[in-house]
Image: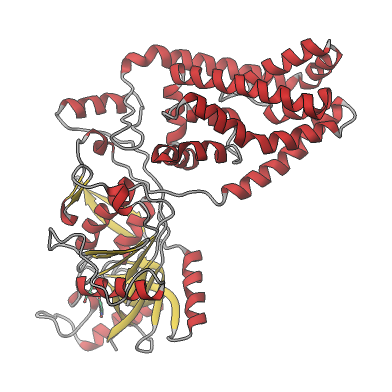
Amino acid sequence: MDIVICNTYEERNTGNSSGSSIESAMQNEANEAGVSFIGENRYPRYVPTCCCKSALLGCILAAVCFSSVALVRQYLKDLLLWVESLDSLVGALLCIVGLIVVSFPCGWGYILLNVAAGYLYGFVLGMGLVMVGVLIGTFIAHVVCKRLLTEWVLIKIESSEQLSAVIRVVEGGSGLKVVALARLTPIPFGLQNAVFSLTDVPLPNYLVASSVGLLPTQLLNSYLGTTLRTMEDVIAQQSVSGYFIFSFQHSLFQQRVTSIHMSNPHLNSMKEDILYHFDLGTVSHDLPAMFGDVKFVCVGGSPWRMKSFIQYIAGELGLGDPNADYPNICAGTDRYSMYKAGPVLSVSHGMGIPSIAIMLHELIKLLYHAKCTNVTVLRIGTSGGIGLEPGTVVITKQSVDALFKPQFELVILGKTVVRSTDLDEELAQQLLQCSKEIDEFKTVIGNTMCTTDFYEGQARLDGAFCSYTEKEKLSYLKDAYEAGVKNIEMESSVFAAMCKLSGIREINSSFYQVFLH
Ligand SMILES: O=P(O)(O)O[C@H]1O[C@H](CO)[C@@H](O)[C@H]1O
Ligand SMILES: O=c1cc[nH]c(=O)[nH]1
């Protein structure tokens, strides 16, 4: 038995297109302009080159922002002392202007202004001032970013998994909740404003959700301001409070939503994404309704085994009747079979790397289109053990090839692409711990060798062809053993590699049935 587990992220598309259609020509143009496509077909964020003017304007704006931030930082203390010396109304107006400035992506000093407002005007007035200033700032930043900074924001999102995740979830329909929750994350305030300007959340709702989300930290900062005695304290304190708020936000953000990550710009220009070997498609099927709740996917070689698994897990987790006849969702094809019970999906993948690779392409797309988040995927299969007691479960640390290298090689357009096959160690440890608690079978963590053939590739003596002696076989298996290989199977390397590309965390463990020694 062989198990692989993974978690998922989301799509951020880049790349070069070489098609001859109008769509692909547009895609090429976008790629040349360094522009990416975000989300699914609904949001083909194509920015044509005629937007050069706005890009230039965006750059100028960004440069102005950066230089003013540098100036503000340098003369910060003088600036705040000057504001303190002004008439309260003028000071309050300046505070609002300041909050508008820091609402832009390059703006800095949001927390400082928040603490200063509390210090200068007391808790209630300070809070009111901050709320009004931030509301106006968020509104202006949203409108300006939407009109002028789209390209800059797209590039920023492209380079950040966290920002990509935020956008993906907002597009996934829980927009307002995410806007509010994102305000509790350590993503800079101005940057968030820019990111949300790319979404189509209605402006009034966006402003309300944003204000609600910002409230806790605003309360905290304003209160802190009231406890300080001098402007010097405010400046010193903001870095301390900033640190605490950052830690608080960071710990919250650790609970972040992870969604599926894909990297194929061509999908955005397709009218329908057809998952041929599942007999499913984005137009023919409502994938979010069918699979949106999936949290665990278990994959394994045989269709029969995957049906048994869904019955077993349904019974174990109280998801359904273990004796019920779960329908094969892919009944329209005999390539793979798929069963579902509550948030658990069970999918067969056939034998060998090519077969599981095709299945994984379609599974990753399915989870992406269904807008699934925080998914864990397990592979369950059989393997041949090396130097282990029969029946031992091996949790794979690294999947290695037949030369014991932890890599997966694929020839793409005539070039060999090498992908990493590291597996998630934390999940491996968790699985090991579970096994200890159950205490029903021996479980070890080790390397798994993934071969492209069951017979000669695994040094067996019972294939149709065999050009080596038993002594040579044993010598090779000894080398494998010394390289840390505990078992042999035929899918783990591409599974690990593809999970990695999708931002998936994975574990591989195997129960062996065939003895090689
Ligand atoms: O038990 P499954 O998942 O089919 O996996 C193992 O069994 C097959 C060979 O008999 C290969 O696919 C190997 O990886
Ligand atoms: O690939 C495999 C699967 C099961 N048993 C083996 O010996 N090898």
Seen as rendered, the residue at the extreme left is: 464
Residue located 35% across and 31% down the image: 36
Count the labels in the image: 0
Question: Left or right: 21 with respect to 140?
Answer: left
In the rendered image, residue 143, in percent from the top left (x then y), is placed at 49, 18
Report the image quarter containing ligand 1: bottom left
Residue in the picture at 62% in, 50% down? 251
Residue 325 occupies quadrant: bottom left
Question: Would residue 129 be found to the left or right of residue 454 on screen?
Answer: right
**Residue 109, how many percent across, how many down?**
69, 26
Most foreground residue, 187 or 212: 212
Above or below — where is 437 with respect to 49?
A: below
Residue 247 shows in this picture: yes
Quarter of the figure with residue 40? top left
Residue at figure coordinates x 20%, y 70% from the top left = 303
Q: Is residue 480 visible?
A: no
- Give the vertical position of 162 relative to 439 (above or below): above
Which residue lies at the image location 43% right of the left edge and 23% below the top edge? 150
In the rendering, at what x and y percent does residue 101 appear?
Answer: 63, 19
Using the image, determine if residue 469 lies above or below residue 204.
below
Quarter of the image with the C terminus in it = bottom left
By what rule are the colours in the image chosen? secondary structure
Find residue 353 and report its horizontal and vertical position in percent: 23, 63
The quarter holding residue 224 reads top right
Q: Is residue 80 left or right of residue 106?
A: right
For the N terminus, which image quadrant?
A: bottom left
Residue in front for this viewpoint, 85 or 156: 85
Who is closer to the viewer here, 102 or 176? 176
